[in-house]
Image (cartoon, rainbow, N blue to C red):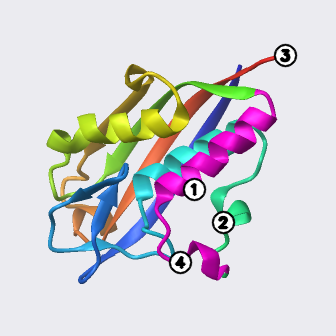
């Protein structure tokens, strides 16, 4: 068993889609980034890569590489899962916490879990996703951006 922690943050800007866990969420702003800036999926990938001792998403998908411009983070997650499989790891479970003042994402959590589970190849009940505000404190509380923490447990095979 190996434990990993991931953290990601992105600025909220106008004229971008808000994508979390592969779900496009209706909102007046979206997250700024080289890819689709899916902060939730990025934190999960970093936790998975960290648990396997494989660095982070910046190492594998640098923002200086044009092939990742606008790419779906679910495609990046697919690649991370391939790397883990090659190293003999599978995801046992993950717990993800989105930090955002708005919008309320609770209604979208089941679809996020389904999206992520399909890519990872695990039951959706092994992925816990929750959201919290910061009581209007800091950059997330002021609505300037979103952050996400993720922890995961990998199982090693063979």
Residue at the right extreme of this rendering: 158
Residue closer to the observer: 82 or 45: 82
Q: Residues within 10 Å of mark 2 (few under 14, many from 20)?
A: some
Magenta highlight: main SS: helix
Check if mark 4's residue and mark 3's residue have beta carbons within 8 Å: no
Residue at left offset 17%, top offset 59% = 102
Q: Which residue is mark 3?
A: 158
Check if mark 2's residue and mark 1's residue have beta carbons within 8 Å: yes
Residue at left offset 25%, top offset 53% = 134
Q: Position of residue 126 (x, y in %)?
A: 44, 22
Circle nearer the N terminus (2, 3)? 2
Circle nearer the N terminus (2, 4)? 2
Circle nearer the N terminus (1, 3)? 1
Q: CA distance from mark 1 to mark 3?
A: 25 Å
Q: CA distance from mark 4 to mark 1?
A: 12 Å
Q: Which residue is mark 4?
A: 69
Residue at left offset 63%, top offset 40% = 48
Q: Position of residue 89 (x, y in %)?
A: 72, 28
Give yes or no for residue 136 being in the magenta stretch. no
Check if mark 2's residue and mark 3's residue have beta carbons within 8 Å: no
Indicate whether 11 appears above or below 79.
Answer: below
Residue 27 in view in this figure: yes
Judging from the image, what secondary structure is the residue with disc 4 in? loop
Q: Position of residue 93 (x, y in %)?
A: 52, 24
* Figure quadrant of the N terminus: top right
Residue 144 is left or right of residue 120, and the answer is left
Q: Which residue is mark 2?
A: 61
Circle nearer the N terminus (2, 1)? 2
Q: Which residue is mark 1?
A: 76
Q: CA distance from mark 2 to mark 1?
A: 8 Å
Which stretch did the figure color magenta?
65-88
Check if mark 4's residue and mark 1's residue have beta carbons within 8 Å: no
């Amino acid at each position: 068993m190996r434990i990993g922690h991931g953290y990601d943050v992105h600025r909220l800007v106008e004229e971008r889609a808000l994508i979390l866990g592969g779900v496009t969420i209706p909102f007046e702003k979206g997250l700024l980034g080289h890819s689709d800036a899916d902060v939730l999926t990025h934190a999960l990938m970093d936790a998975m890569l960290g648990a396997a001792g494989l660095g982070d998403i910046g190492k594998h998908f640098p923002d200086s590489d044009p092939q990742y411009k606008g790419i779906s983070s679910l495609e990046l997650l697919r690649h991370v899962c391939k790397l883990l499989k090659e190293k003999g790891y599978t995801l046992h479970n993950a717990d993800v916490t989105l930090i955002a003042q708005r919008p309320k994402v609770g209604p979208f959590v089941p679809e996020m879990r389904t999206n992520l589970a399909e890519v990872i190849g695990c039951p959706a009940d092994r992925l816990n996703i929750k959201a919290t505000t910061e009581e209007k404190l800091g950059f997330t509380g002021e609505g300037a951006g979103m952050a996400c923490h993720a922890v995961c447990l990998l199982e090693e095979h063979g």
